[in-house]
Structures are given as structure tokens and as C-alpha cells.
Image: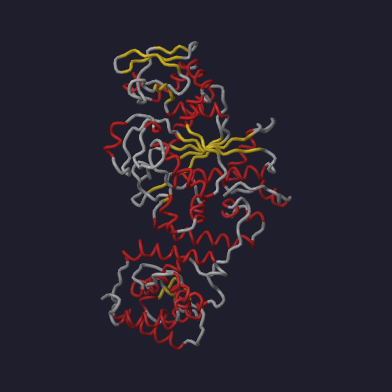
Amino acid sequence: MTRSSITDLNSEILAAAAESKAWPFEEAKKIVERYTGRDFPETVLFETGYGPSGLPHIGTFGEVARTTMVRHAFRVLTEDKVKTKLLCFSDDMDGMRKIPDNVPDRAFLEPHLHKPLTAVPNPFGGDYASFGDHNNAMLRRFLDTFGFDYEFASATDYYKSGKFDAMLLKAAEKYDDIMKVMLPTLGEERQATYSPFLPISPKSGRVLYVPMKHVDAKAGTITFDDEGTETTLSVTGGRVKLQWKPDFGMRWAALGVDFEMFGKDHQTNAIIYDRICNILGGRAPEHFVYELFLDENGQKISKSKGNGLTIDEWLTYAPTESLGLYMYQRPRQAKKLYFDVIPRAVDEYYTFLSAYPRQEWKERLGNPVWHMHDGNPPAIDMPVPFSMLLNLVSASNAQNKDVLWGFISRHAPGITPATHPELDRLTGYAIRYFDDFVKPTKTFRAADEVEREALATLEKTLGALPAGADGEAIQNASLNIARQIERYQDHSKKSPEGGPGVSGAFFQMIYQVLIGQERGPRFGSFAALYGIEETRALIRKALEGELTA
């Protein structure tokens, strides 16, 4: 996902890009159209916003990853002749309205409520000067791990250094126009006290939500009551910040942002951001609204709650590329972001990667891996799916990678950790994922009489197969058994001989009884990898009641 030079833009790629319906290209085309009839600016600016009120979560990363994909698509459409920049902006001057649930010492933070996040002491210890600085560092650490090409920006730095001074003075000048936009969006009680300006109290250091007694556009000052004392402050130099909705529009105008995406929870406010940007003399950027991420209970994930997955948690159980794929897919669809989505994301990534070399350019530019890898997906052979590794760990009770490699090398001679380092990496992830999420939920059940007979027949049939029988032979032998059992016949399907097909309940039964799970990969492939004799032994254990003991 790093920014690399684009050197192979031949006419075929450019033609495919111009017609591509992949969503990063659709968004990039809007930016190209934005400058139709006039020159591009010196730098086209892509921005992402981050509220460091808690530790960064995967949703935060997703915004940067997706914006990077749009940026790369724009570079291709413009043949990389236009300079671009991705600015990751942290709203770290916001007041800490509540104490996050996932800090080590809540009482430590209580005296600092409503202070700017960069003025709140760091509850995690270490060398970071503030809570905001710590959380910013956590975000940057992860973005750097992924190799994103970005520039980090701190609201505190921008306000205090004067980068926003000219626009803040303009906001004072346009105070009445901004209020006309904001007041109709507020309730009656809030209207009476609302101000787009939030002074930082010289007394308490807190961000104050107080009405303005006077706004002097010529002097560039605001006057308000601070704990009963009438106080006048300059709007410049970091003494004052803007409410978050006006701040959005002000930042767009001040920086000349061309593209910003945000979650669906911002969608109704987008028109407000746009209008304030226009009032301040800017041109609102192109938008992309994505659906929210949900936790296992269907609730929106939150930095302060700490629900859903953290960045580090995903990377404990799966490679970074699987997370990149998850961010690419269906961004306008709400998606659950919990541990059970990981295995599928891993296998889908390698499936897309395997398909890429066989595709024409039109299909390649619609393949997620092209967007994830800046148009240069790696060539990786993945002979064993992640889901298969998980079931292999489950059946073998493997505690280390050597055990898994014993099965893999026997099944596929010549494949070793040295020849397939990516597969070796997945074996480690599979063991960790199994130990933490699969093993605690495994529930073996005893087979009933029909199932016992089916399993006994399967065990005998496997023993009669020729040595070295492959997954296809094992699968077909299993299907032939199921076709003879009424319970597992599916009359909506046809067997090769014209009889009924096989219901998925047959293989579900096998995994419930033998593995202690509701489902698994294709049984023939699993048995071939695990070994026919090992699979027969597993069946015998199940029939003898050893697995449920």
C-alpha cells in the first residue's frame, strides 16, 4: 500500500482504467472531473480525519487504506502527472468529553475532563506528553507498519502554529453567516448557547461551550464569560478552536482538500460542512460516504468503548493483506468487524491473488489485490487454504508449526517452509486463531444410529481406496456413501447417475462429530491433507466415544 512510482502505464491499462467500475476508480474520476476545464493545483489533496479520543481501531485504518486506493486510482487516471498528498489529520485539540472505557486508570483522567486531548496527561505512561500524543502515536505506528505514504497533521499544531489563523479570522468575519447555517440544525435550548467558536479557558485550560457576548471581526477577538469573568481572546494562535461541524468546513477551506471520505454517521452533516467551506471561500471536496463497522452484537464500533477488533488483534491472527482486502470489499455495506470474519478474509485474499495473473486488464483493475498493492500484486502460491489449516490444527491438536508441516509436506512433497514462506506464516496464525477462538467453542456430539452406520461405511470405504488417493477421489467416495442414505439425499439435485444428490447435512454431520465444529472445508481435500489413515483413526475414535469423553 506504499506509494510507488507508476512506470508501466501502457495504453491497455489506461483504457481499462477509463472504463473501470471499481469503486476507487469511480471516486477518482470525480476528482478528475472536478478540474475539467482548468488546471490541476500543484498538489491534489486527499484527507482523512481521526478523533484521538481513544485508541485507534480498524475503522480508522480502513479510512486511510480506502483513501489510498482512491489516490492510486487517480494517479493512474492522470498518468501520474499530477502531484498528490494524503494528509491524516488528528482532531487532537478536541476536549475530552468522557473518559474512555479502555484506559488503565479512569480516576487519573477525571480532573482533566473537557481539556484538549493534547493537554490531558497520558494514562498509559511512557514518553508521550499527553493522551492525545499517545493515541496519535498508536495510529502512526500502525500506518507506518503498513507502509502508507501519508503526512500526519495535528489540529493542536495547526491551530497553535497559525496555519488556521487566516481562516479563523475569516470565520469571525462570517460569524453571522455561519450561525445562519448552524442554528436551524439545533434544538431551541442549544440555539440559545451555541457558538461556532470554542475558547480554551485561560483559567481551567478546558474547552468551553459558552455563548459569545461579542465577536469583533475587525480585531479578530471573541468575548465570553469564563466562570463569571468576562474574557476576551484572540481567535488566532490556538486560543480558540471551532466546533466540530464548522471545523470540518474550515479545514477544507484552509487546506484546499480535494477528497475526503467519512462514515455514514457524518452523512447528514455533509451539507453543513460544504456550506461552511463555501462561506469561508473554499470549494467543498469530493465526498465518499462508507457504511459503519459493527461489532459482534451489531453495534457501531467505538474508540471510547473499545468494542470490536483492535488493529493489533487482527494482526495477531492474520496477515495484514487480509485486513486490506476486508477494507476494499463493499465499502457502502455495513460489515461486522469481529474475529469470525478473519478466516474468510484470509482465504479470499489468496484466491484473488491467485486469479490475478490469469486475468485481462479489465478484470485485473477490478481485482481487489490490484488496488491493495498499488497495481503490483505479489506472486504467491498458496497450496493450502487458511480454513483448511484451521481444521488440520483442530483434527491433529497441533501445538506448533512442525506438526502441521509434517502433514503438509507428506501431502505435497517438495513444499517446505523455505519454498513457501507465506504458507509457513499462515500456519502460525492458524494455531493462534484456533487456540483462542475455535478450541474454546469446540463441541463434539455423539452420532446417532444412522450417522454411526454412515461413518462406519466411510471408514471402511476410505480404507479400500488406493494408496495416494487424492481429494477428488475421497470426495467422490464420500458422496457415493451419502447418496445411499435417505436422510442425506437431496432430491432437488441430481447425481451423475441420475439419482438424488447429496445434502450438505452429510458433511456438516462429519464435522460436528469428528471435528467438533459446525462446518469445515471440502471434506475430500481435508482428508487428503490430514491423511486417509489419520482420518480413519479419527472416525474410529468418534465411534468409540473417545471424542465426546
Horizontally, residue 98 falls left or right of residue 491, namely left
- Which image quadrant for residue 359? bottom right
Horizontally, residue 371 falls left or right of residue 335, namely right
Residue visible at 48% across and 78% down in the picture: 528
From the viewer's side, name the closer residue of 245 and 405.
Answer: 405
What sort of colour scheme is used for the picture?
Answer: secondary structure
Q: Where is residue 503 in the image (x, y as percent from the top left)?
A: 41, 72
Q: Position of residue 452 (x, y in %)?
A: 32, 81
Give the answer, above or below, for where 338 lies relative to 47: below
Give the answer, above or below, for where 325 lies relative to 252: below
Q: Position of residue 384 (x, y in %)?
A: 51, 69
Give the answer, above or below, for where 516 lies relative to 83: below
From the viewer's side, name the closer residue of 161 and 320.
Answer: 161
Tell how many labels.
Answer: 0
Residue visible at 41% across and 66% down in the picture: 431
Q: Position of residue 303 (x, y in %)?
A: 38, 42
